[in-house]
Image: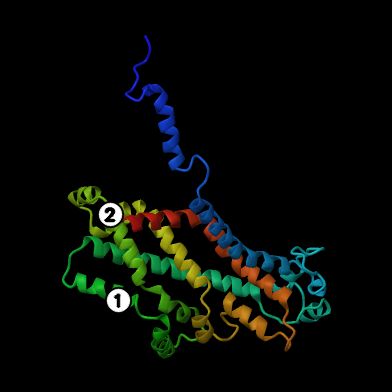
Amino acid sequence: MSPPRSAFGASPQGAAPAARQSRFRGVGLGAPDGGRVFAWAALALMLAVTVAPLLVMLATALTPPQQLYARGNGLLPAAPTLLNFRRVLGGLSGDASLALGGSGAEVDFGAALWHSLLFTAIVVVLQTASCAMAAYAFARLRFAGSRWLFGAFIGSMMLPGVVLFLPNFILVKELGWLNSLPGMVAPFALMSGSAIFFLRQFFLALPRDLEEAALLDGASHFTIFRRVVLPLSTTPLATIATLTALGIWNEFFWPHIVSPGDAFQVLPTALQSFLAQSPQGQIDWTGLMAAATIAALPTLALLAVLGRRVVESVQFSGGK
């Protein structure tokens, strides 16, 4: 028996492949459309603009000081060397650095790296913990003035950071914390309005069943927060920790005015000191780029490990 035919003379079986082909062509399985090509070209351009300075920085750091201006237009040096990293990490004396074509600037980047790691770790732990507790309180607890207090935290996001520098500096000076780790950590150790808002949105989306069951078992709110909510919130907590770490790692102005000496110098201020010690008009580019590479490596490693979690968490909160 022949298959049934439609009113136009074509069988349904024969029409189905053509319909599927036209439908698939609409979702991009056929020839790419102009919008898709433009999007990929824009992404490739942004990637090139982002990666090119990093490649130039690394190539300059691997170039011997005497060959920097003789390298020509080539990106990679003819004879890569780690000598510049040894210079900035204190492996060579100032005289030896001058003999090799460096500036002879003596900045302890090893100590600055340790100070930056310590400064960043303390701020990340304190700020993430305080913001998580505050966000859980705003999401689950009802108390007098909670809406007004939450609105005040949201309003603090509209204040430029530079407005708070002077009162913070006066407070740190009165406490006697200048040129010390507590003075550097104090303004960043407490809560951040943006972090509280971000975590509160996530906590509101969590189901209440587990928390209500824990309340029936006699658990306190802090126990529920510590043993129920936190294990379910590793992705947004990792996002807040990552974004906080990136901001604190690159912080320059506050450490520069609170700890201007060498006692507790972090990497951004150490880079500025290295540049200031260069002879007039003769910047030690190879040493400066080696130090900048050392400063950039931890942030690149952090993004490589936690970057996917940051994107997933932002997508989830944005959808809510």
Q: How is the image coloured?
A: rainbow
- Residue type, numbered disc 1: Gly
Location of mark 2 (residue): 205
C-alpha distance separating marks 1 and 2 = 23 Å
Identify the residue position indicated by label 1 in the image: 155
- Percent of width and height locating residue 134: 29, 67
Percent x, y of residue 305: 52, 55
User: Count of labels shown?
Assistant: 2
The extreme left residue here reads 144
Taking the image as shown, residue 190 lies to the left or right of residue 243, namely left
Whether residue 289 sits left or right of residue 11 in the image: it is right
Quadrant where the image shows the C terminus: bottom left
Q: Secondary structure at mark 2?
A: helix
Which of the pair 262/60 is nearer the observer? Answer: 60
* Image-quadrant location for residue 10: top left
At label 2, which amino acid type do we have? Ala
Labels 1 and 2: the sequence-earlier one: 1
Residue at the image position 30 percent from the left and 60 percent from the top: 201
